[in-house]
Amino acid sequence: MQNMGIEVLFKGNNFLRLLEGLWITFQIAIIAMVLSVVFGLLMGIIMNSKNKIIVVICNVYLEMVRIMPQLVLLFLFLNISMKVDIA
């Protein structure tokens, strides 16, 4: 059987670094889930408001987020944050 290159994982501290990256990914996923639940509940409570202007603003925001691909939103956020840091 051909050399699959798996032994590279066990050289030095590669496997340990891989596990550290897996742990960081897990932490980011948990934080993202908690934040999405909290913000989703807040948005749902705000959407049930009697004030029509607030409901319209929330609907526009939700539609904008739904329509845009996530990568575009990340680029917009990065661009805005870079401009704030420079100024």
Image: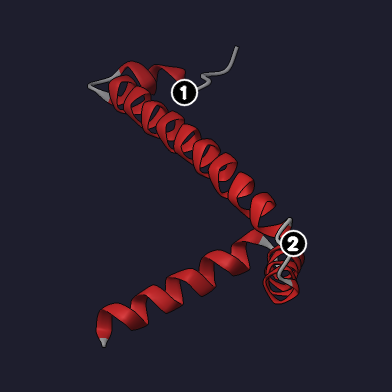
Residue 13 higher or lower than 32, as above or below = above
**Which circle, 2 or 1, is nearer the viewer?**
2
Is 70 displayed left or right of 26 in the figure? Answer: right
Label 2 close to label 1 by CB (< 8 Å): no
Is 78 displayed left or right of 16 in the figure? Answer: right
Q: Amino acid at mark 2?
A: Arg
Distance of label 2 from label 1 (alpha carbons): 41 Å
Mark number for residue 5?
1
Viewport quadrant of the C terminus:
bottom left
Identified at 42% across, 27% down, the residue is: 22
> Counting residues from the N terminus, which is met first, the one under dot 2 or under dot 1?
1
Mark number for residue 66?
2
Q: Residue furthest bottom?
A: 87
Q: Position of residue 38 (x, y in %)?
A: 54, 43
Q: Amino acid at mark 1?
A: Gly
Q: In this rendered view, identify the residue nearer to me: 8 or 65.
A: 65
Q: In this rendered view, identify the residue nearer to me: 21 or 56.
A: 56
Q: How many marks?
A: 2
Identified at 44% across, 34% down, the residue is: 25
Identified at 32% across, 27% down, the residue is: 20
Q: Quadrant of residue 83?
A: bottom left
